[in-house]
Amino acid sequence: MLNPNNTAAKLPAGYVEDASKGPMLRFQESLPHLPVPSLEETAAKYLRSVIPLVTPDEFARTEAAVKDFIRPGGAGQQLQKKLEARASDPSIKNWLYDWWNDAAYLTYRDPVVPYVSYFYSHKDDKLRKNPVTRAAAITTAALAFKAQVDNKTLEPEYMKKLPLCMDSYKYMFNVSRVPLPGRDDAVSYDPNTHKHIIVIRHNRFFKILHEVNGKQLSTAEFEAQLQKVYEATEGQPKATPIGALTSENRDKWVKYRELLIAADPSRNGAALEDIESASFVVALDDAKPVTREERAHQYWHGDGQNRFYDKPLQFVICDNGVSGFLGEHSMMDGTPTHRLNDYVNDAIFNNKVDHGAPASANRNLPDPVEVVFTINTDVKEAVDTAVKDFKAVIGEHELAVFAYKGYGKGLIKKFKSSPDAYVQMLIQLAYYKCFGVVRPTYESAATRRFQLGRTETCRSVSVESLEFVKTFEDPKASPAQKIAAARKAFNAHVKYISDASAGKGVDRHLFGLSQLVEPGQEVPAIFKDPTFTYSKSWYLSTSQLSSEYFNGYGWSQVIDAGFGLAYMINENSIQVNVVSKKLGVERMRYFLEEAADDLAEVFSTELANKAKL
């Protein structure tokens, strides 16, 4: 999906390379600004998107509200002028960026796990089944990637041959989310003066320098350091899990952090800074997950204790040598960490990373230093509450993995279909089979071609997708009719997600307009209309990130009545991580398989007919 490409040839007019910024950021200042769609095009697109979701009477009410909103001299036109003025302000690089970061992430007060963070499950490394060797190799490979980010030599990513915004990479290493009243923030530390990782084992934190006397530790040296952590914790009772505090509701964590620092301002303040300033976290879990579901649970949330959930990068290595990754989402979307994890695994599996010299006694490396907190009664009570709350929240969820080996993008392309559109419609068909209705569906569309771009919503339910699921479930419909309905749905989806990636979606534009309604000003009817709220209640929250080096990827649902469906489309397989609050993930997995079979069976008739010709 994202292709690093070292040539700037044939870029459209307007892109200028600034070599002084380094290869990674050389296009940054000339990336286009996120556009503001016209009021009329958003209104038309919005109305069409809600047709399959509402009754005729509800649609008539919505249509009236929209027409009133966009009429000459109406509230919509006034808000549009304000938004266009904001977008053209030279001091604002992206009219959406600050608003969206606040509303979607930093002011969001529910726990980041399970509701915000996401995980990747790595393919097994058959050469490194020992957790020490696996963790050391991952550390070395991650530091090789970090070096390119720090010195700005990492090649930008490209999508459709256009360079993407690389600004969010500054929130990858030596960074932490920090809880603050009402709104969190991200704190960054100088990578030149903070050259350590944090290793967590049995809820204890250890600081390991990754560079000593100007030289990075070799993989063998990391193995020796990690082995010392295992030895220090072996046979010892698990520590009071300070990391559990980061699993709390954000406002509770604000209060608990204050209690923690008050217990010993000097020591505990310094301990927090050691963790928050670390390049990244390596969590050494004593679990031994085997199945896809066991691994998903382990990397997505674990036991809620052997973590520090505010860190954007946590590599998790288990006692049986399997590994994964947990990402905190607030300042950085999945595509940069997907690239990091893909790089790490590719470097290890294909021996592309320099593991350095064997460990040498001559190096005289300092031992890992335990990061110790002073814990008083208030802190202990806070930790106990956090552990109890975490178990309750995770206990509300269920997870299943649909791992389909029947076919993947190889066959889908033979069907002359977009793999992403195909799987989106597969999901629509499965949901319709399960519940007999279609409901609002979100797919993440990347807008990183723009300065500070993050995401836009692709509304996967369309007039065409509704007709598609009805046709496929009609026993009287012929294969030709089903294929025709499917292709119309695929094409509609490709059109919408292309528009969304180009900044011409519906949801961010309407969100921006709503942000400009002044306090005390009458809220326009379009924003009070029940259809507006319902149509962005994501009963299906979906996104694709695919890698041949992952055997899992996922996150939670975004509303209690919904599912979180994270999917991968590899050459010969399709995998969907299914999460919900006890809505029936096993049933959904069953219908995903049935839908995958149905689609292949019908499209194979087309291939068979072409073969006869």
Image: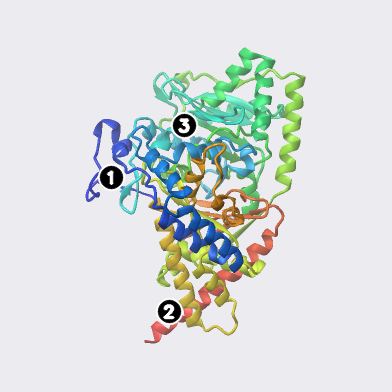
Q: Residues within 10 Å of mark 2 (few under 14, many from 20)?
A: few
- The Cα–Cα distance between marks 1 and 3, rounded to whole angstroms, is 23 Å
Q: CA distance from mark 2 to mark 3?
A: 49 Å
Q: Which mark is residue 410?
A: none
Front residue of this view, candidates 277 and 462:
462
Which corner quadrant holds the C terminus? bottom left
Given the image, on which type of amino acid does mark 1 rest?
Asn
Task: Please identify the quarter of the rendering in which residue 191 is found.
Answer: top left
Outermost residue toward the top in this view: 266
Badge 3 amino acid? Phe
Instruction: Determine which of the numbered discs, if any, sits on residue 607 in the image.
Output: 2
Q: Earlier in the sequence, mark 2 or mark 3?
A: 3
> Which of the two residues, 458 or 334, is positioned nearer the viewer here?
458
Q: Residue furthest front?
A: 73
Say above or below: 123 vs 148: below
| Amino acid type at mark 2 | Leu
Q: In front: 605, or 436?
A: 436
> Residue drawn 30% across and 52% down?
161
- Classify residue 19 by image quadrant: top left
Q: Estimate how packed mark 1 is, as few (under 14), some (14 to 19) or many (20 or more) residues with alpha carbons within 10 Å.
A: few
Q: Which residue is mark 3?
A: 173
State the residue position of label 1. 6
Residue 70 x/y as whole percent: 45, 54
Q: Secondary structure at mark 2?
A: helix
Image location (x, y in percent) of residue 167: 39, 36
Q: CA distance from mark 1 to mark 2?
A: 38 Å
Q: Secondary structure at mark 1?
A: loop
| Residue 331 showing in the rendered view | yes
Dot 3: element: loop
Q: Is residue 203 visible?
A: no
Image position, residue 61 (x, y; %): 58, 61
In this image, 25 relative to 407: left or right? left
